[in-house]
Every structure is written in C-alpha cells, then in structure tokens.
Amino acid sequence: MKKLIFVTGGVCSSLGKGITASSIGALMEARGFTVRMVKIDPYLNVDAGTMSPYQHGEVYVTDDGAETDLDLGNYGRFTTAPLTRANSITTGQVYKTVIEKERAGDFLGRTVQVIPHITDEIKRRILVVAESPDVDITIVEIGGTVGDMESVPFLEAARQLIHDLGKQNAISVHVTLVPSVSAGELKTKPTQHAVKELQEIGIQPDILVLRSKELLSEGLRSKISSFTNVELEGVISAYDVPTIYELPQVLYEQKADAFILKKMNVESKHAELGAWKQVVDKVKHPGYHVRIGIVGKYMELHDAYKSVWEALYHGGIANSAGVELVKIDSGKLEAAGADIDALLGGVDGILVPGGFGERGIEGMITAARWAREHKVPYFGICLGMQIMVIEYARDVLGWKDAHSTEFCKTSKHPVVSLLEEQREVKNLGGTMRLGASESITRPDTGMRRAYGMEKISERHRHRYEVSNIFRDEIEAAGLQVTATTPDGDLVESCEWPDHPWGLGVQYHPELKSKPTKVHPLFKAFIGECVLAAKAKSAR
C-alpha cells in the first residue's frame, strides 16, 4: 500500500509545518524512499499568482508554470521530489472543479454538499499524487490551524483517508507550540487543547512535533504523552536551531523517522545524512563573511523574497561563507538628499530581485548605476535584469527617458516592453511567461563560466522583455547579451563590460537552488562577493 503522512498545525500559525513536512521528506529520502509532497491551502484563491507578496509571501513557480504557495519552495530545497501544479491544492481549485461538474450535470441532479462532494474532490487530488506507481510516501501539509473554519473540509478528507486506508498506511503528524511564560516556565496546556481539537474532528495524532525555544525534557514530553494518547517515542522536541537545515538532523537524533516508519510497518536501511551534516557544519563554521545588499520593494515582509534569501545562504554554503542580508528598501534611495554611498558603501555585493509595479524603480536604477560605477558585484533577477538595461541605456547611451512600458507608456526609448508592443519585430501577445524555458548561454561569458554548459533550463515569471527594437544599439554600446532563447529572439541574460561580476537574468534561478545542490549563479555571485570582501579588508 502507498503511505500517507498528514501534517497539521495547532495553537497558532507560522509554527513551521512546512519545514517539518520538508524535513520528514528529507529523512524519508535519506532512507531510500521515493517521496512526494502536497500542500493544501485553505483559501478561496485558485492559486497564489494574483496574491500580493504582503499577503502570502513569495509566489513559488514550478516547471509546469503553476503559481503556488511558498511552502513548495521549502519542499524543493529539502527534497528531490518533483513539484508540479498537482502538488498544490487550494479551496478555490476544489470548489471551482465541483461547481463546474455541477453545472455540467455530472451529479445527475443530486444535491451537492461539502460531504461527500467537496471531500471526495480533495481526496481525489491527494490520491492523484499518492498513487503514482513510483511513489512510496506522500506527505500532505494541511495549511492553517486546526480549529479554523476554512480547514474543516480538508481535515475531514484526511480523517476519511486515515480511516479508509488504515493507520498503517496513513498517519497524522501534528505540530504545536510549547510556550514559556514568566521565569521561563514551559506550558503544555496549549498543546493539550490543540490535540483535543484534532481528536474532536476524529483524528488521533500519531506524532507530536513540539515547537519550543529549548530542547524539552523527557519529563515534560512524558506529561504531554500521557495527556494526548501519543506514545512517548512520538513526542518530538523541535527546538530552535541556528539554521532550518539542521531540523532533519534534530528529528533524526530523536528517532522521529524510525518511529514514523514503525507506525507504518515499513522497514528501511539506515538514513544517510552526510550531505545535511556538511551543510550545517558550513553554516555554523564559515571561513569568510560577506554582506549582501538586497535592494527591493517588499522588504517589510521577510517571506516576500524567501527563495532569494535561501539561495544567497546556499551561495554562502558553497563558498564556506557566512552571508549577512542587508535589506534596503529601494524607496530610500529615491529620497531627496539620500546618501547613496552610506546606504550601499558597506556591502560586498548588490542584488536586485523581481517585482511588479512602479514603486521603488528609480531607487533600483540608482543601485544598479552605483554598483556598475563602483565595480561592486551585482546580480539582477527578472526585474533586476531589466533595471540593468534601463540604467545602461540612460547613462551610457544617453537616453535619459529610457524606461519599461510597464512603468512609462510615453517613453521614446522603451528598452523593455511587452512583445506585442515590439510591432516591428513580431506580435506574440503580452501573456506572462510562466514555468521552465530553455536558454542558450554564449561562450566566454560569466553565464557560460557559471553553468559550464551551453543549454540550460530555468523558470520564468514575467511579462516584459528587453526590446528587440533597441537591442542592437544597446549591444553596440557595450552591454553584452550573454544568453538568449534557443531561437535567439529573446534576451535571457546580460552582463556589464569591464566589470568584475555584473550579471542579470530574466528568469528566477533562486527557485532551483538547494543547500545540498547550490545554483551555479548564486555560487558564482557569492564567490565574487567573497573576493570583494577580501580585497576591501586588504586595503
């Protein structure tokens, strides 16, 4: 039988269900099992594509073009499980499918209800992933907090699957909080109530993952075990660690993976965690230290650029360097009298990430010009690459009104525009490029040196492109186009001439970086920043 692991959360949100699910996935893979990950989001949006980063963090894009919740990024960083649109389920998707079936007469006039019709659709979507021939274990994270009204249909679907498949084939992992109050006294009552709420739905958790500041004592774990009907072996202390990539090791040391497999009556080989131990060791004991200035427009919410932060840390791991993130709101660079040297002078590299909308664009252009003129390593991602092109056109070619038509429709030099606006070239329409696309890197470039190969595949999420109308003039002025689509029509990467490392890409490389398999561009970027830091300290 296929095995299912449901991961739920109690007490409050943001306890780390996604990291817990991802760590369990990493441990199962370390034992030789083929894993799949599913995220359920109980919001009515069909997907995360139209949601503001301030609402729900970054949009994680899969190879097949699905716009999903950022937790799929955690799955991608911790496991090798392929991620597609089938791995992301939302309330909006479920209800949309059921209503469309009702309109088409598929229910033959019967009353359509949450049970069984909605729960059946939820189960169908889970089993589409779980019943694939090559899958051993499917881990299903149910978003939200037990007790929330919107999560009830998904928890009921989980209850039904656990009942139908049997406890040896479907188990429950519940993540809760053990807070400390005055004088550091730990309180178990929130966990007791959280488990009670889950039991009232009809689900008895098999494993409790307890979030806390410090490692919980056996006495406290024993108390929780006796109040919740969870075996002591299944009460796991998930205490705070310096890096999230240490959690698989924390769970392994408490034999959480062995207990999970025992509950599912599965035998396996010993877990091989050598790669994860190396990652943790490099994070804890860096040989160097670099400060990376990220100039963006969504700095108030950490999760808005979650994959970028993690990929920068990965670049540090690859170079045995500790990475300090210096978050700079691009709007501050636009303020009258802003001291640009003071804001940017203390960093060893600058990264401008993606984004939509006009706010903060001039500040990003200022940051790009400062990095180019001061020979500071610069990495532009998606919008960050378009910023490079706009800045170069303004400052080097002298086109002071150069811009993107996303922000200025009246510019006489729209060096970035929708494809349909480039009427002299082609009329392909302005639909968003989503998902994996192939690119060809050019020889003797930073791109080719970083990747070490000609043909690459990366994930896109954008509508605007470097304009082919002005491309020849921009290249003649020195800006190098270093990767294109296979037909040569679209610019995928550009680089500054006579610069230690000034590179921008139209896609999102951060989405494919892992701590155990660092993306080559982040490895190369942080490597250059380490060299810049060394040179600075030698002066």
Image (cartoon, grey):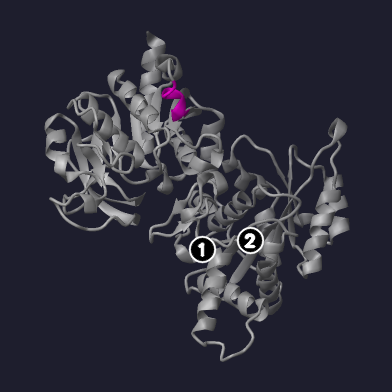
Label of residue 380 in the image: none
Is residue 204 magenta-colored?
no
Q: Nearer the viewer, mark 1 or mark 2?
A: 1
Q: Nearer the viewer, residue 61 or 330?
A: 330
Q: In what quadrant of the picture does the C terminus appear?
A: top left
> In the rendered image, is residue 33 in sight?
no
Q: Is residue 107 above or below residue 401?
A: below
Direction from residue 192 to residue 505 in the image, left or right = left
- Tag 2, which secondary structure? strand
- Residue at screen point 68% across, 49% down: 13
Numbered range of the magenta stretch = 329-335
Pick the residue in front: 52 or 405: 405
Label of residue 142 in the image: 2
Residue at (66%, 47%) from the top-left corner?
Answer: 14
Type of amino acid at the residue the image marks with label 1: Val
Q: Which residue is mark 1?
A: 46
